[in-house]
Amino acid sequence: MFQETMRDETAAASTSTDAGGRPFTAEMFIETIDKMELVFDDDGTWEMPTIILHPSRELMFKKEMGRLDSDPVMRARMKELVDEKREAWRVRETGRTLVD
């Protein structure tokens, strides 16, 4: 039921990524993160979303996520994306009005 609800809600919000049966890749992760509103703590540090996957996919997931650090092009794209999202977050936070 949880997965069905998440699938329906993310599709309605256009924040889902349909892999079309393709295996998970670092590029797919970046594509997905690009569609999301990221969460940052008070210091502006990105809080990576919770990722749920089958245990049999753990090694493949770690390998692909490792590419985000080891591949200079992937690392630069990820940094650029997170920096863009952080700036959007700062703008949203600055524009907030606190109510007494």
Image (spheres, grey):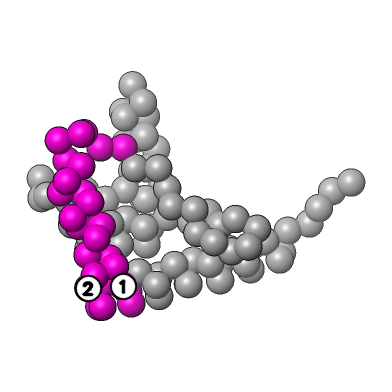
Using residue 27 as the reference point, say whether residue 95 is left or right of it. Answer: right
Identity of the residue drawn at 37% across and 62% down: 34
Which labelled disc corresponds to residue 75?
1
Using residue 49 as the reference point, say whether residue 76 is left or right of it. Answer: left
Identity of the residue drawn at 17% across and 40% down: 57
27 or 11: nearer the viewer: 27
Which labelled disc corresponds to residue 7?
none
Q: Give residue 69's position: percent from left, percent from top.
A: 29, 68
Q: Give residue 42's position: percent from left, percent from top.
A: 65, 58
When the figure is inspected, residue 75 is found, relative to residue 56, above or below; the finding is below
25 or 1: nearer the viewer: 25
Identity of the residue drawn at 27% across and 65% down: 68
Q: CA distance from mark 2 to mark 1?
A: 6 Å
Q: State yes or no: residue 38 in magenta.
A: no
Magenta-colored span: 52-77
Secondary structure of residue under mark 2: loop
Answer yes or no: is residue 19 visible.
no
Secondary structure of residue under mark 1: helix
Q: Give residue 49's position: percent from left, percent from top.
A: 42, 48
Question: Count the marks: how many?
Answer: 2
Q: Which residue is mark 2?
A: 71
When the figure is inspected, residue 56 is found, relative to residue 48, above or below; the finding is above
When the figure is inspected, residue 77 is found, relative to residue 19, above or below; the finding is below
